[in-house]
Amino acid sequence: MSIIKQKLSSVPEGSAALFFIQIFATLGFAILYSTLVLYATKKLNFSVKEATAIMGVFGAFNYGLHLFGGYLGGRFISNRNLFVGGMILQVLGCACISGGTVMQMYWGLALFLTGSGLNVTCINMMLTQRFAPEDNRREAAFLWNYAGMNLGFFIGFSAAGYYQLQEDYSSLFIFATIGNFMSIVLAAFNWKTLKDRNTTLSVSTPSEFKKKMAVGLAVLVGLVPVVFYMLHQAESTAQIILAIGGLVAAVLVYLTVVHKDVRERRNMSAYLVFTLGSLVFWTLYQMAPTGLQLFTVSNVDRIVMGVEIAPQWIQNINTFVIVFGGPLMALWFKGLREKGWNIDVSIQFATALLLIGLGFLVLPLGIFLAPASGMVAFKWIFISYIFQSIGELLISPVGYAMIGRLAPAKYQGVMMGTWMLATGIASILSSYFSGMVPEAADGTALTTNPTYSHVFGILGWGSVAVGVVLFVLIPFMRKLITNGPAKEAESESNPETVSA
């Protein structure tokens, strides 16, 4: 920890605090993300189709509500207040789920999702506010923060796997409750340091501040029963979220077209292209707690050197790559750029899509090489997660940092929320693909292996195709993404490309 503190001391005040807050804030989500489908099917007797549908809506709300968080934070309620308020709801939600009934699960998810959905954008906004727009240390700070997030995932996945093997779900959710509460404690100790900077709310009069605060709190509390109701209507809710996603996309396209500043308009256009690429990436990535997890539980031989590997522990392959790879990648990219390599966001996005595509394409190969039992060797799911994790490292933290560069100041919160909304929509799409695989009536992997192979093949080749298209578009994207005043952006002769 002392080495991490020393490294983070070179970035602006508050960045180190947010790193440690991120660790504890992630615990509850990591546990629910990796366990919800198994908890619903094994403990509450949901069918696989029902559990997968709820998981799709869980992911959609968790990410989709970030749009509200991006709009509320800094406008109606400060980012630090909204973050703490959201964490309080998460604590209450995990405690409620630990009760062990279907109704407590629904209310717990409603509380948790409202809190998680509204506060994740806040922590990213608090971090990005620590830097000036031209500060090149932003990428390293986001990579470090992303590593902190994945430390939280590692702890959460490890605990989830341990309690999963014992099927002691109550203790697991109590553990999540305590972990999330610690993030509130850390935020309280760093309250002054995390003060909002350069937001609409920060220049409000005291009376305006109180009125806006009341609106923000009303939304925070009022969303809980709405989410509770919509969780009961998973299929209809999924369609509504997809429709909202389409509407938001149309609004962003309109705002981009009518934006007067030429440089900012081009940057916003690049943002739209990257958002489409991220939608493809996250559709595959969100298969981890649904289709991939079900495949791992029923179709993969999880006995390694005589030890049964819990499904949640397998997801820690991703965590190890992120935790150790994040800081190393930041240093590696820094060295390459000092040598003149143009490692920009376009290359990173295209490569990420190729990698996650390959991660899915190795699974049909593993199924093809499976023995007569149909159980796929563990090494294939291991290789798949390695590819996916490196791809995530290229696209996710870089995507957050990219918004600080590409989004005009007045649209930063909304565009950050929209970026996460795309991940929520991807969760719905991934649940559809997961629902294509029927349960094995005879209890053997041979029954479902052909369908899994077909679905994984479609997803893998689709992602590879999009990655190739993005590689072809790299010269065009580099012309769109520019620094400097608008008059410089109008000239395409020699624009200065930027990286996220």
Image: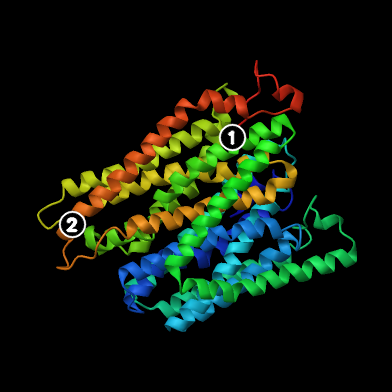
Residue found at x 58% / y 65%: 116
Residue found at x 46% / y 78%: 105
Residue found at x 41% / y 69%: 36
Quarter occupied by residue 448: bottom left
Q: How many marks?
A: 2
Residue assigned mark 1: 270
Q: Residue 160, how many percent across, how many down?
A: 41, 68
Residue assigned mark 2: 375
- The label nearer to you, 1 versus 2, is 1
> In the visual, does 294 lie left or right of 131?
left
Q: Quadrant of the C terminus?
A: top right
Closer-to-camera residue (277/240) = 240
Label 2 Cα neighbours within 10 Å, binned few <14 / some 14-19 / many ≥20: many
Closer-to-camera residue (435/210) = 435
Q: Is residue 35 visible?
A: no
Q: Which mark is residue 31?
A: none
Please name the amino acid that badge 1 sits on.
Answer: Ala
Q: Image height check: is 313 above or below 228?
A: above
Please name the amino acid that badge 2 sits on.
Answer: Met
Q: Quadrant of the N terminus?
A: bottom right
